[in-house]
Amino acid sequence: MIGAEIIWSLLALNQIADAVRNRRRLNALSVLKPSDVAPDPALRFVVAPGVTLDAETRAAAAAHMRMHGIAALDLVPGRLPLATAWSIACHVDAEASRSAGWHQGATAAHALVAPSSLLQSMGMADTPPDLGTFVALAGEVRRRVDGAHDLAVAPRLEAMDSNPFFRAEVLAARLAGGVGPVAFGMPLMWLIVGLGLWLAPWAGLAVVVLLHLQPVLAVLGRRFEVRGWWWQLFLRVPVDVLSWTRLMGSRQIPQAQDKADRDTYAALVADGLAPFFEPEAVACPLCGSEDLNDHLSVPDFYQGKPGRFRLRRCGDCRHIFQDPRLSARGLAYYYRDAYDGRNASGMDVLFGSYTQPYSDRVEMVTRHHVVRRWLDVGCGHGHLCARGQVMLPDARFEGLDFGESVQTALARGWVHAAHRGLFPACAPDMVGAYDVVSMSHYLEHTTNPRAELDAAYTVLAPGGVMMIELPDPDSPWAKWLGRLWMPYFQPQHLHLLSTINLASLLREAGFQPVQWETGVAHQGSDLVLSAYTFLRWLSPPLDAPWRPIARPLARIWAAMVWTPGTLLLLLAALADWMLRPLGKRLHHASAFRVLARRVNRPVGPAEE
């Protein structure tokens, strides 16, 4: 019992720290002052559905922007319930948002003001059709505005009736496309609080008391007019339960759009799954050997789309590849809503959740080459190019991708030019135009790696360099974790190239490897991603339009899986952190990268 008392005492201290942190966040918000000066006509105000913005607030906001040199301003309601104020403190960190680099801007989900030209280019109406659209666009404003972005409390602005941060469409826009951190995190919190009363009565009681006091300690002050805080102080748990119930009953996607998406997916599979696959291979696509062995057979763990996918290994060169390979129709089907559409914000948040790998890739290039014009193939939203512009301000960074994300990268200014299409098809129009080409976790997605390397040879000037990063199929984590090892990533990873096989392809294409980084390229997330894969296998996405409409039993099962699963993910992340130094010292780890220089074809025999 003493150990339990210590654990729950630490939880109580953490609650105090949360209250202090959130109070500091709220105190960092400026407060609008009255003004009788008319707003600049070049500015436009946008409000969330159901929110009203009076003339006095508009004038005060415009005056605040002029006084402080702010180009875009998100407005925080000054009149609001205690629960909403606490949620804003949990989700809105103004100081972090001001210096957040490429991350989406913070928003209180009520109203904003920005240059009319910017909002018009984003297609943002004065009142977006739904709250999720407002929040997604409000977060994007900071990335695109030319100038400072900030938040301020509008004393006269009334908060909407229900807490916006317990709406599925809001959390989907803010938290990587899903409601999981709140939907399953809150029951886990209640479970921990209940266990505390049983296992550690005194410390558990302190946790319960602090749970109720937290919002009051953080919120009360001169910045907000909080309605009915005294009764909410005693009824936090019922208020939270009601908010959580509303969250579980709300929708991430508007009903009309969801129906249209379901009709589209039903039409795509009307002929069955057979058209999505090419005939089985009779020989290895790398060496031509007919000695092929089954390696793994797995479902789509991540999107939960129908089908089962086989990986085969060549008995001679040991190459692992998908067989039968996806056809053009199959690629279109399985990539739909994977990186854009429904999952665009999730991928954007995921790829923007770290900076070190991007810095490592740029540093690898600059150790051996002076960069002038860089083409990032498979650039996605342009995170590598954005980081590259910070590190190499005199270089020009361009992005190429098949999806619409490359246009988003251009609109944000993260790339200097955007090219949309397949790399081998675009290459003839780019002959010798670049001195650096990068392919970060791109080559494994392509149907023909040889054609991609030939395209890189075409677009590079003589002496130019190419940086490639790939998952390492020789990783010990691949052996230990088996089918749950995330980089198998079926059905999207068509080829899993080893260092030896990639070296052979590079020399064949006219490149000389300059430097290999194996263990040092280890990213240290294998266990948490495998845990996530396992949970996705147990409970696939509930509201995906390619899956049957989720019934109540499916939602109950999801809660039973993901509530304890949240703890599993935390433990796996801790284990990854502890094992990361070991991974960095291994010859093969989760990933590897290589820098190769363009030379004259052909080159000698392959060596790692």
Image (cartoon, rainbow, N blue to C red):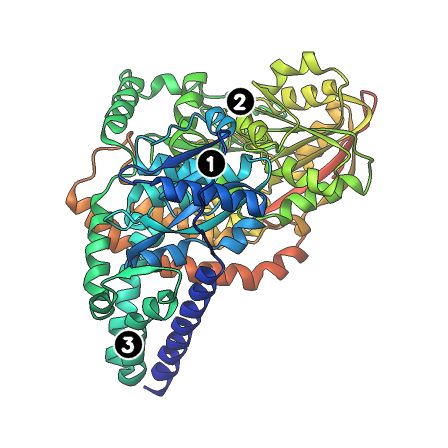
Q: Say which residue appears at 70% left-offset and 23% top-offset.
A: 456
Type of amino acid under label 2: Phe
Image height check: is 421 above or below 99? above
Marks 1 and 3, how far apart at CA: 46 Å
Image height check: is 228 above or below 340? below
Q: Secondary structure at mark 2?
A: loop
Q: Which mark is residue 209?
A: 3
Q: Say which residue appears at 54% left-offset and 25% top-offset.
A: 407
Q: Is residue 585 left or right of residue 163?
A: right
Type of amino acid under label 3: Val
User: Which sits in the foreground, 409 or 69?
Assistant: 69
User: Which sits in the foreground, 344 or 509?
Assistant: 344
Q: Say which residue appears at 55% left-offset and 42% top-offset.
A: 66
Type of amino acid under label 1: Pro
Which residue is the site of mark 2? 402
Name the spot of residue 227 as percent of width and height, x first: 25, 60
Image height check: is 320 above or below 77? above
Q: Quadrant of the C terminus?
A: top right
Q: How many marks?
A: 3
Q: Secondary structure at mark 1?
A: loop
Which residue is the site of mark 1? 39
